[in-house]
Amino acid sequence: MHPTIRLVNRNLTISLNPGFLVWQVIFPLVYIFVAGFAYTTLIDSVPFGNTSLDYPAFIASGMIGFNIMNSTLVSGIIIWNDRRHGMFEQILVGPFTRRNYILSNVYTIGIVGLISAAIITAIGFPLFFKSVEFNLLTIPFLVFASIVGSILFGSIASVISTRLKSSEGFNVIINTVFLFFAFVSTAFYPAEGAPEPLATAFYLNPLTYLVDIIRAGIFGTITEFVILEMAVLIVAATSLFIIAIKLLTKLDL
Amino acid sequence: MSSILARSLSKSYGSVLAVDGIDLDVRSGHVFGFLGPNGAGKSTTIKLLTTLIPPTNGTIEILGINANKNPLEVRKRIGVVLQQPSYEPNLSVENSLEKYGMMWNIDRKTRKERAAELIDVFELGEIRKRKNEDLSIGQRRRVQVAREFMHEMDLLFLDEPTVGLDPGARRKLLDFLKNKAKTGLTIFYTTHVLTEAEYLCDEIAVIDKGKILAVDTPDQLKNTFGQEKTIKIHLSDRHQKLAELLSEIGDCIIDFNTGTDIIIQSSKSEIVLSKILQILIENNIEVEDLSAVPTTLEEIFLKIVRNSDAPNN
């Protein structure tokens, strides 16, 4: 078996613990079903492109992006945990190169992102199937969002993992990043109608772009703006990925 | 044949020279002890030899492979237990052994057999299902050392492996390593516990401030640096004038004197001892205990390090 695949196997084993699964499945379910239906009494429908969606369909589709972000942030901190528990050095005195280690993390993050997207799509499907406009681009859009989103958020977690040294600092930063990404985005509510500067802040957040792309794929509302969002996401993901790789390559032992 | 051959090996971090042009020659099948005080350069040397960090200068050949050019080929044939703990917190002891074997590409059947064997040898049976994060420091260390034997190797680096182990576990580990060395495994062993080095090692190097101060077999080190014997006198009552009388003997140094306990170092211990007895009898001084003991490796180690600290060095 190739060394990178052996490391991916190891990464998945240590990531997929009960706490992670609860975080990945139970939390989005609570958001989709509890918040989705509870807010329906307050929010009748949400404007989306030329159409409008009922709130459960809106939040269920938003949760796909939310879960990609959430799971890949958690997977991205494998590097932090490896450093903290001495496994980073232990792996690098084993039959592996840094390249193997870095690639294994990229693949792990990608796999976790894809699985998370698939789970939430399956769970949320009954809620948004009435509004779904399946076309040839639906699946490619979802796969694109899963992969690019995973690389982007995984790279952010990797950068944080390589730069910080104390657990306290790491927890503060990762929680702040999570809160900003999760709630200053269009995952839970639309940007339209939000007061300034909040509406602008939504578009400083990559999760907004990710969620817009996912919704565009699911509800068949692919516009020029969505294509622009895809381009922005690719540039951001690539830049952060390069930074993460450089920092990991130079990480002191 | 040499398992480790290093020449003019240096490592500097900015202006700090952690390893200063050392030469090492570790013969295959030997247990090589690497001793030194904290910050002497032991762990940096291990990091260099295991290819974890590149040297600033010098060459390293491990098992006949140029480590500077082919670090991965070296790492495939060595085992390393680093000084810092390393573990997967949420894996059980059994799973972490199994997973480590998988990382080394060991087939499933062999992994299961080896894990069972190591659980038995390292007495991990009672904690086999317990997660690493729930283990004590000593138990975690035992798992860390056991784990390294999940894969085959020709050379094993152990950086203070007995830290946190109780005396029983420590002795069992040393015996296990001794038996492994008999099968041809070369072991590079750093420790602070000098009795361990004396028990286990065929050859010992003493390092301080990044330089190797002495390399030899434990017996030869004793012959070279340990000609002196330590004479210990314990009196029933304080005797003010005894130290004064002893200082007139010559050929000895009074190392320690509380009035009732006196420690003397001498390279002519037999002559000095008879003179001491004469003084004690002539002055009617009551003695509770009088002994002359050979210099231990610990004393030799301290002497070597002390000599290197002397101003003319």
Image (spheres, rainbow, N blue to C red):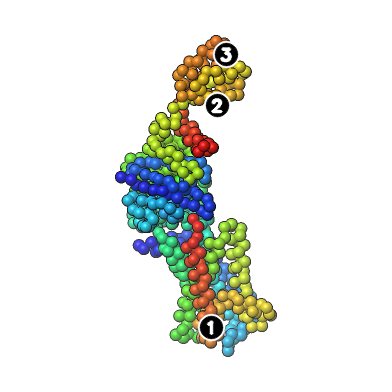
Q: Is residue A33 visible?
A: no
**Disc nearest the viewer among 2 and 3:** 2
Q: Residue at x 59, y 72 (%)?
A: A181
Q: Residue at x 46, y 21 (%)?
A: B269
Say which residue label 2 marks: B255
Q: Secondary structure at mark 2?
A: strand
**Of the pair B168 and B45, the residue shown nearer to us:** B45
Q: Secondary structure at mark 1?
A: helix
Amino acid at circle 1: Leu
Say which residue label 3 marks: B285
Q: Residue at x 38, y 51 (%)?
A: B60
**Residue at the right extreme, as displayed:** A195
Picture layout, residue B9 above or below residue A229: above
Question: Circles 2 and 1: CB distance less than 8 Å?
Answer: no
Specify the subunit that label 2 lies on: B
Say which residue label 1 marks: A228
Dot 2 and dot 1 within a common chain = no
**Of the pair B70 and A12, the residue shown nearer to us:** B70
Give the image quarter of residue A157: bottom right
**Disc nearest the viewer among 2 and 1:** 2
Alpha carbons under labels 2 and 3: distance apart: 20 Å
**Of the pair A119 and B310, the residue shown nearer to us:** B310
Alpha carbons under labels 2 and 1: distance apart: 82 Å
